[in-house]
Amino acid sequence: MAAPATVTFAGANSVVVGISLLSSPRILAAKGSHFLSPSSFSKFNLDFAPLHQRTSLPSTKLVVRAARTESKGLSLGFRPPDFQLPEPLTGKVWTLEDFESYPALLVMFICNHCPFVKLLKKDFVKLSNFYMKKGLAVVAISSNSASTHPQDGPEFMAEEAKIFQYPFPYLYDETQDVARDFGAVCTPEFFLFKKDGRRPFELVYHGQFDDSRPSNGVPVTGRDLSLAIDCVLSGQPVSSVQKPSVGCSIKWHPETNL
């Protein structure tokens, strides 16, 4: 059996950045929203209108100090570890076996508060709605410590899933063991697995959603991830040259030394 290929990451080392945010009211996901039906990644268009800043009142600038972290390279062919995690919204406990009947599985490590996740939140909901109809299984996991970031705790996760109408289960990794088993370090972080017949899932993509970042002005398209999903579902090879996902560091429990 040939040795597994290695993902080639293009990116800089982790740095600490200050992110300037304007306070804004909560925006609820519109009911009945739909995903535009592209035939390939080149037509993947999320059709977002930019938000306009208020000018009638003096703006209050909230500076968030966040650890800008890149996902670590993993060997292609990596098999997803077993897990058993609760879904706060429904109380159901999910395992890897629940997704074994699907030809492909997308595992997303996300959270509620991270600016990098907030930028993409509506978009990966649209992406999931579109590709789940084509046979993709999707699951999201939050591993952030609720003791240091209570807004990422299970009660708020359930609220988040309702507000944004998540079509996928949003699971709580309280012990953070699943994040460690996957090698996840940031939010958002994407792991795309495929399977051939009865063979176990194997990692084919561990990269970014697209080039957009908070405040960099690049439109959100989902291009990188959607291209990888298109390749998997059509039986085409996925390029091993993949840009790492960039986001906030996973908030480990205070007693955890990594």
Image (tube, rainbow, N blue to C red):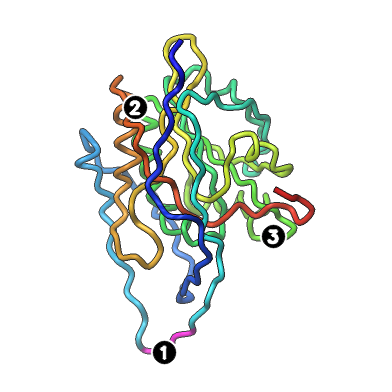
Under circle 3, the secondary element is helix
What is the CA distance from the residue labelled 2 to the residue labelled 3?
Answer: 36 Å
For residue 30, the mark is none
| Residue occupied by mark 3 | 150
Mark 1 and mark 3 lie on one chain; the one further toward the N terminus is 1
Q: Is residue 244 left or right of residue 67?
A: left
Q: Does the magenta stretch mainly form a helix, a strand or a loop?
A: loop
Q: Earlier in the sequence, mark 1 or mark 2?
A: 1
| Residue hosting label 2 | 134
Residue 163 location, x and y as percent? 51, 54
- In the picture shown, does residue 111 fall above or below 5? below
For the residues labelled 1 and 3, the Cα–Cα distance comes to 30 Å
Q: Which residue is mark 1?
A: 57
Label 2 sits on what residue type? Lys
Q: Position of residue 139 (x, y in %)?
A: 52, 36
Q: Residue at x 56, y 27 (%)?
A: 80
- For badge 3, the amino acid type reads Pro
Describe residue 193's horizontal placement relative to residue 223 as left or right. right
| Residue 241 belongs to the span the image colors magenta | no
Task: Give the extent of the magenta segment.
Answer: 56-60
Q: Position of residue 230 (x, y in %)?
A: 30, 30
Q: Determine the residue positioned at 52% across, 76% down.
A: 63
Query: Within 10 Å of the Cα at label 3, are there few (<14), some (14-19), or many (20+) other Cα atoms?
Result: some
Distance from Cα at disc 1 to Cα at disc 2: 46 Å
